[in-house]
Each structure stands twice: as C-alpha cells, then as structure tokens.
Amino acid sequence: MGALGGFLYWKFIGCSSGNCPLTSNWLIMTAYGSLVGYLLGNAVQGFMKAK
C-alpha cells in the first residue's frame, strides 16, 4: 500500500520542475512510500496488540 501511495503521489502531485530530490524520481518516491507504509503499519499493529 505504501509503494502504491508513493507512486501515485509522484504521478499526480510530484515535482514538475525536477528540482525536488524525493518527488522528482518515481523510483525514490515509491521506495519512500514503502518505508512510510511499513512504519505506519508497524505502529498500527503495535497499537492494536497493546489493546
């Protein structure tokens, strides 16, 4: 889900000038989205286990 979110962010919102280090490259943005998705998923899973 994170990778898809990162790719869609690059596709529809990303940097059009090419000067943005994260959002100008689809591969970097997809990897960043994967990382953020993993971290959020881990946080939610830990929160659900705590209950």
Image: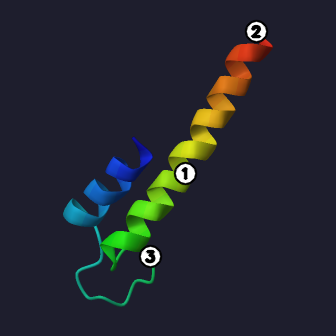
Query: Which of marks 3 and 1 precedes in the sequence?
Result: 3
Q: Identify the mark at residue 22; answer none if there is no mark.
A: 3
Instruction: Indicate the position of residue 25 as horizontal and vertical percent values.
Output: 34, 78
Query: Left or right: where does residue 33 sit relative to residue 42?
Result: left
Image location (x, y in percent) of residue 27: 36, 71
Does the residue at mark 2 contact the one at mark 1 (Cβ under 8 Å)?
no
Residue for point 40% across, 67% down: 29
Q: Residue at x 35, y 49 (%)?
A: 5
Helix, strand or loop status at disc 2: loop
Q: Amino acid at mark 1?
A: Val
Q: CA distance from mark 1 to mark 3?
A: 13 Å
Circle number at residue 36: 1
According to the image, label 2 marks what residue? Answer: 51
| Residue 41 vertical position relative to residue 29 in the rendered view, above or below | above
Q: Position of residue 34 (x, y in %)?
A: 48, 53
Question: Are the residues at dot 3 and dot 2 in contact (C-beta closer than 8 Å)?
Answer: no
Q: Secondary structure at mark 3?
A: loop
Cα distance in 3D space between marks 2 and 1: 23 Å
Amino acid type of the residue that numbered disc 3 sits on in the rendered structure? Leu
Quadrant in the picture for residue 30: bottom left
Instruction: Locate residue 19, reporting x and y percent.
Output: 36, 90
Please, what secondary structure does the residue beneath circle 1 have?
helix
Instruction: Locate residue 18 relative to residue 37 in the image: left or right.
Output: left
The residue under label 2 is which amino acid type? Lys
Q: Please, is residue 7 above or below residue 1 in the view?
A: below
Which residue shows up at 32% across the image and 49% down it? 4
Q: Residue furthest right?
A: 50
Q: Quadrant of residue 51?
A: top right
